[in-house]
């Protein structure tokens, strides 16, 4: 329901509860059809490394569809808009699943296009639905409780994500055929569609819909002139591009460089999500203690350690050592909560809708484009440089050497330049 005035405390608490329930189901759904399963699906269909690198960037690049979310929010509000796009998102996952059918009929190119297009719309509809997630969070919470609110939502997502991951790992231990992965994606799609019912029960203020109705171009300049917001966009490009070049390629390295089974790859992903789940419980305290800027920088520094574990990995690979990059990846996910809080603090309420769109196009879509070009380009260059090597792992060593040089310079600099502002302590419980 869209309310004329500010939400009552009871409406805020009800909305927070609905969002927690949504995140519980969404976490389970995402594990069944998200990035990890899509990459395993593409590997199973023998897609080239460069295409898998593109898939790793699709989550950010698809933010180009975010302005569509503004158009729908202007008509029906933020919560209902997100619910509608979440249904579309999970239907798009079925396009990815259809690749198994095309492959069955030996239409390999069609199967690859089905994965790419399905992944683009899957992530694109998510971006369109999430355009108002930050303003909606601001509507449902007071400033003193936002760190806790984001932490609880993240924890809810990761708890069910871990549960689904364990179930999927058990299933793939006994049967890891392409049809098994297809059924897992379809199951995740059904659960995701179900989760959208909770979004429709969230109340919001009319201010969000009114802000979505305002012309974009007249307000872009106001948001961009905000120096804190502008520095956040530069930092987000570097932060997200680093994740694109390192995290999905770590999974690919496990599969094709270390020849780990699907079940083994999912167990390493379990390390990632377990670390993210544990860290989510401490997110609020860490951010309130050190401030959002320091947390973002620290998370970026953690990510820069990832390439070195692959560069120095002995042959045959050490399973325990290979888990550390995924542990660091999970821990660095705290940075996403920190950037969300930085955003809400940098912009006033009336500028947050426009800021969300600008943040999506610059901080996400541009990062996706940069990450896509760098990851696929570096992989092709690494394949060229590794020709003639007797070690099948040399390709991935070279890739991570090249990726580190870019991430440690071009990507880390804008994060370091993120502007400071006075930190506020959380209200005591």
Image (cartoon, helix red, strand yellow):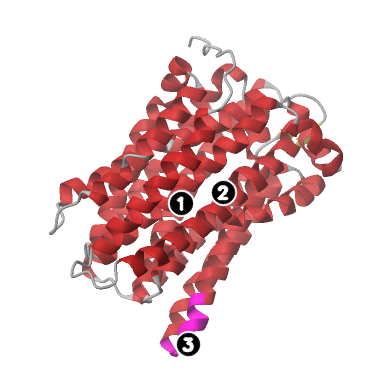
Q: Nearer the viewer, residue 283 or 240?
A: 240
**353 w.r.t. 55: above or below:** above
Relative to 77, does residue 63 appear above or below in the rendering? below
Q: CA distance from mark 1 to mark 3?
A: 29 Å
- Asked whether, in this view, residue 147 is left or right of residue 286, the answer is right
Question: Is residue 34 toward the left or the right of residue 7 in the image?
Answer: left
Extreme residue toward the bottom, this view: 105
**Magenta-colored span:** 104-112
How crowded pointer 2 is (Cα within 10 Å; few <14, some 14-19, many 20+) is rated as: many
For label 1, the residue is: 244
* CB under 8 Å between discs 1 and 3: no
Residue 107 - label:
3
- Asked whether disc 2 touches disc 1, contact meaning CB atoms under 8 Å apart, the reply is yes
The local secondary structure at tag 3 comes to loop
Instruction: Give the structural element (helix, strand or loop) at label 1.
Output: helix
**Of 226 and 338, which appears nearest the observer?**
226
> Which SS type dominates the magenta stretch?
helix
**Residue matched to label 2:** 367
- Looking at the picture, tell me which residue is in the foreground, 15 or 276: 276
């Amino acid at each position: 329901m869209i309310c004329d005035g500010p939400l009552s405390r009871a409406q805020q608490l009800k909305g927070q509860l609905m969002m927690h329930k949504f995140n519980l189901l969404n976490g389970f759904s995402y594990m069944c059809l998200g990035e990890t399963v899509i990459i395993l699906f593409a590997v199973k269909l023998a897609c080239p490394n460069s295409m898998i690198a593109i898939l790793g960037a699709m989550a950010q690049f698809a933010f180009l569809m975010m302005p569509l979310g503004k158009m729908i929010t202007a008509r029906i509000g933020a919560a209902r808009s997100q619910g509608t796009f979440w249904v579309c998102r999970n239907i798009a996952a079925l396009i990815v699943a259809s690749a198994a059918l095309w492959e069955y009929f030996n239409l390999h190119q069609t199967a690859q296009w089905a994965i790419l297009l399905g992944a683009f719309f899957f992530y694109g509809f998510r971006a369109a639905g999430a355009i108002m997630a930050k303003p909606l969070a601001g509507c449902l919470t007071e400033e003193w409780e936002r760190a806790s609110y984001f932490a609880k939502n993240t924890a809810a997502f990761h708890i069910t994500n871990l549960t689904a991951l364990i179930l999927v790992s058990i299933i793939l231990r006994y049967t890891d055929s392409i049809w098994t992965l297809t059924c897992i994606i379809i199951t995740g799609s059904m659960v995701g569609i179900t989760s959208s019912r909770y979004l429709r029960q969230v109340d919001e203020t009319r201010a969000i819909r009114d802000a979505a109705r305002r012309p974009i171009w007249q307000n872009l300049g106001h948001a961009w002139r905000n120096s804190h917001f502008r520095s956040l966009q530069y930092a987000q490009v570097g932060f997200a591009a680093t994740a694109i070049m390192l995290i999905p390629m770590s999974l690919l390295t496990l599969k094709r460089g270390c020849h780990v089974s699907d079940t083994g790859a999912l167990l390493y992903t379990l390390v990632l999500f377990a670390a993210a789940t544990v860290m989510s419980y401490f997110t609020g305290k860490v951010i309130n203690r050190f401030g959002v800027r320091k947390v973002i920088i620290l998370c970026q520094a953690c990510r820069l350690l990832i390439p070195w574990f692959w560069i120095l990995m002995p042959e045959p690979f050490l399973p325990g050592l290979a888990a550390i990059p995924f542990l660091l990846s999970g821990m660095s996910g705290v940075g996403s909560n920190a950037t969300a809080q930085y955003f809400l603090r940098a912009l006033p309420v009336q500028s947050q809708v426009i800021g969300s769109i600008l943040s999506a196009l610059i901080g996400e879509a541009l990062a996706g484009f940069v990450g896509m070009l760098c990851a696929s380009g570096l992989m092709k260059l690494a394949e060229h440089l590794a020709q003639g090597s007797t070690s099948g792992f040399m390709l991935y060593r070279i890739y991570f050497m090249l990726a580190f040089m870019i991430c440690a310079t071009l990507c880390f600099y804008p994060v370091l330049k993120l502007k400071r502002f006075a930190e506020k302590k959380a209200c005591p419980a």
